[in-house]
């Protein structure tokens, strides 16, 4: 495997799910006509009775998931992220989080993965919405390793969780033995000048930004923060104390996601200059996922430029 | 989380074993007495809290009492017992009726009812399963309980378990589209172990259902969605007992329970303002006089 190899994490989601389901009969998959797009064809072949398709009905999808959990099942409730989180937001709040049921909400193809299909099919609001719901961990895996870690953790953890399952191809960035859990993060590069806290598709881009800046003599600390809620406050506050600024990078609207969470913490505990990279609360223009990430500056160059700005090496 | 009241839970077990040997008509005599006690308790809760939804509480009381005291397989001392029957109150604003019934059955001490909606009480205005034993899901926003009940029934069917699920819906609530999503799912999966009861009191918060967004022909809607329909008087305990008999068709069962909002107190019956009006001290006295 070359470091240039990239992966559609939906395959790792499906493989890990099938592996766990083989030894745990409580695991069921619940979807909204998304057997193909949730990559559940293999699961259906192996466990036809345990693949529940409620049809195109997302409110029912989440409610049925909560009921299955009530009946002793461990449901992986899976749908395209924009429809799961937008259409069924109240069910996620009341039936999964507030009711504290063991429902695993799997937002497939999140961010701008469905680029050309347009903002109706983009899921950039999900992190703001999910973070606003109490008692609901929010997980954004960066690669196949974290996708599998997330699936395993979700089965063990007795409560609800929202997991973004990436479709946009990403390289492996996580060491095999990396810790994974609420309030934990992975520091991928050490650096004392600026910190980048990145999630999902932006982690590999942050690592490339670190390479670019290293050539300029700037040390970038790259932190991968798969738990956007509850996030690793210790790592954030250490970054605030030990480096001269924090850049956050996410494939989501900046109104309430990772950057908003980090900013809220440092503003009250240890103020530090920040740049919050994401989608600036606009509906995206037409374009592929790759094009849109470039369009919004969610690239290695964009991250590097933000870091330089914090050091006063670029435009202020 | 509240816990069971052991003497009340023991009384409940005795009641259930006594009722088991009786005819439906004989059971109904006892269930009517319990329904009166539950209605009196609801009056006291709402008059203390100065909040609540008394009209809908009274329309659903006979249904709820029949389910808990006459039909469902429950153990207040073990509220999370995996093989219990599930009762889901989708019309969560009628929490006072649910709490009063649960307390009557010993799921928690009756003294707790005096805390209804008081600061930090477990007895919120809408039920919370994390705090109140016997509550299966947190309801309140309408159109939530039915999909959850459908999922529970599906879990039992997948595992070949014999426990059943009953969900109680408000009639106005049937205007929520999520209910019809669940009706299709339950029908598709042939969930004969699921019973949906519509508390058909014909009034919603602001007006009659038929003047707001008409539900009729409601029975035909259920039938066309693939459900076995039972149309009953929702205040006739014998009829409720019989309607709660298992499905005969292999399909899920819908009970359209024709009820009267405010049932049991003459000046509240079928009057839209009693959706969430709070009785005055004099009205409380008059209501308690009638509920004997």
Image (spheres, rainbow, N blue to C red):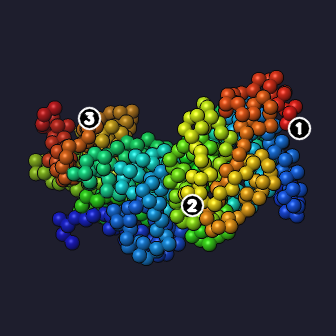
Q: Which residue is mark 2?
A: B226
Between label 2 and label 3, give the one nearer the viewer.
2
Image location of residue B269, percent across then percent down: 75, 33
* Chain for numbered disc 1: B
Q: Which residue is mark 1?
A: B292
How far is the residue under mark 2 from the one under mark 3? 61 Å
Between label 3 and label 1, give the one nearer the viewer.
1
Which residue is found at the position 42% from the left and 63% from the top? A151
Is residue A191 toward the left or the right of residue A217 in the image? right
Is residue A212 toward the left or the right of residue A157 in the image? left
Q: Earlier in the sequence, mark 2 or mark 1?
A: 2
How far is the residue under mark 2 from the one under mark 1? 41 Å
Q: Quadrant of residue A284?
A: top left
Q: Are marks 2 and 1 in contact (CB under 8 Å)?
A: no
* Chain for numbered disc 3: A
Crowd band around label 3 with a 10 angstrom C-alpha radius: few (<14), some (14–19), many (20+) = some
Q: Are marks 3 and 1 in contact (CB under 8 Å)?
A: no
Crowd band around label 1 with a 10 angstrom C-alpha radius: few (<14), some (14–19), many (20+) = few
SS at badge 1: loop
Crowd band around label 2 with a 10 angstrom C-alpha radius: few (<14), some (14–19), many (20+) = some
Image location of residue A27, percent across then percent down: 50, 68
Q: Which residue is mark 3?
A: A273
Where is A142 relative to A43, above or below?
above
* Chain for numbered disc 2: B
Q: Is residue A71 visible?
A: no
State whether discs 3 and 1 lie on one chain.
Answer: no
Q: Nearer the viewer, residue B191 or A8?
A: B191
Q: Is residue A88 visible?
A: yes
């Amino acid at each position: 495997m070359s470091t240039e190899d990239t992966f559609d994490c939906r395959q790792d989601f499906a493989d890990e799910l099938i592996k766990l389901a083989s030894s745990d009969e409580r695991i069921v998959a619940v979807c909204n006509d998304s057997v193909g797009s949730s990559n559940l064809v293999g699961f259906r072949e192996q466990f036809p009775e345990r693949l529940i398709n409620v049809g195109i009905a997302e409110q029912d999808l989440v409610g049925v998931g909560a009921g299955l959990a009530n009946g002793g099942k461990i449901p992986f409730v899976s749908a395209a992220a924009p429809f799961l989180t937008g259409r069924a937001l109240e069910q996620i709040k009341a039936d999964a989080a507030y009711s504290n049921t063991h429902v695993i909400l799997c937002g497939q193809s999140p961010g701008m993965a469905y680029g050309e299909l347009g903002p109706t099919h983009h899921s950039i609001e999900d992190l703001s919405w999910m973070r606003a719901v109490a008692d609901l961990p929010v997980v954004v895996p960066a690669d196949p390793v974290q996708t599998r870690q997330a699936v395993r953790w979700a089965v063990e953890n007795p409560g609800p969780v929202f997991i973004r399952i990436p479709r946009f191809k990403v390289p492996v960035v996580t060491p095999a033995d990396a810790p994974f859990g609420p309030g934990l993060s992975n520091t991928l590069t050490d650096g004392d000048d600026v910190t980048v806290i990145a999630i999902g598709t932006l982690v590999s881009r942050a690592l490339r930004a670190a390479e670019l800046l290293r050539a300029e003599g700037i040390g970038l600390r790259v932190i991968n923060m798969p738990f956007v809620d509850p996030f690793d406050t210790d790592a954030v506050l250490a970054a605030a104390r030990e480096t001269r600024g924090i850049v956050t990078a996410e494939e989501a609207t900046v109104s309430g996601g990772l950057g908003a969470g980090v900013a809220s913490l440092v503003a009250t505990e240890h103020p530090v200059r920040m740049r919050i990279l994401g989608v600036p609360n606009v509906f995206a223009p037409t374009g592929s996922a790759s094009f849109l990430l470039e369009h919004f500056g969610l690239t290695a160059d964009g991250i590097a430029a933000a870091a330089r700005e914090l050091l006063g090496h670029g435009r202020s | 989380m509240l816990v069971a009241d052991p003497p009340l839970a023991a009384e409940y077990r005795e009641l259930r074993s006594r009722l088991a040997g009786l005819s439906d008509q004989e059971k109904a005599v006892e269930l009517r007495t319990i329904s009166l006690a539950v209605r009196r308790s609801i009056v006291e809760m709402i008059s203390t809290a100065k909040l609540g939804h008394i009209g809908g509480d009274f329309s659903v009381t006979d249904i709820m009492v029949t389910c808990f005291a006459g039909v469902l397989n429950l153990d207040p001392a073990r509220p999370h017992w995996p093989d219990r029957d599930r009762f889901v109150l989708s019309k969560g604003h009628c929490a006072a009726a649910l709490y009063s019934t649960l307390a009557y059955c010993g799921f928690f001490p009756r003294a707790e009812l005096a805390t209804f909606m008081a600061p930090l009480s477990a007895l919120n205005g809408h039920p919370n399963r994390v705090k109140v034993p016997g509550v299966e899901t947190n309801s309140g926003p309408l159109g939530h309980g039915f999909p959850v009940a459908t999922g529970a029934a599906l879990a039992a069917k997948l595992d070949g378990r014999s426990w059943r699920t009953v969900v109680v819906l408000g009639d106005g609530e049937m205007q929520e589209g999520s209910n019809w999503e669940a009706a299709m799912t339950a029908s598709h999966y042939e969930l004969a172990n699921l019973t949906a009861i519509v508390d058909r009191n014909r009034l919603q918060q602001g007006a009659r259902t038929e003047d707001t967004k008409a539900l009729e022909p409601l029975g035909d809607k259920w039938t066309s969605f693939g459900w076995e329909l039972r149309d009953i008087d929702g205040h006739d305990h014998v009829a409720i007992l019989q309607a709660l008999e298992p499905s005969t068709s292999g399909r899920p069962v819908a009970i359209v329970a024709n009820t009267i909002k405010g049932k049991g107190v003459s000046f509240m019956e079928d009057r839209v303002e009693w959706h969430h009006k709070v009785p005055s001290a004099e009205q409380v006295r008059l209501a308690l006089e009638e509920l004997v």
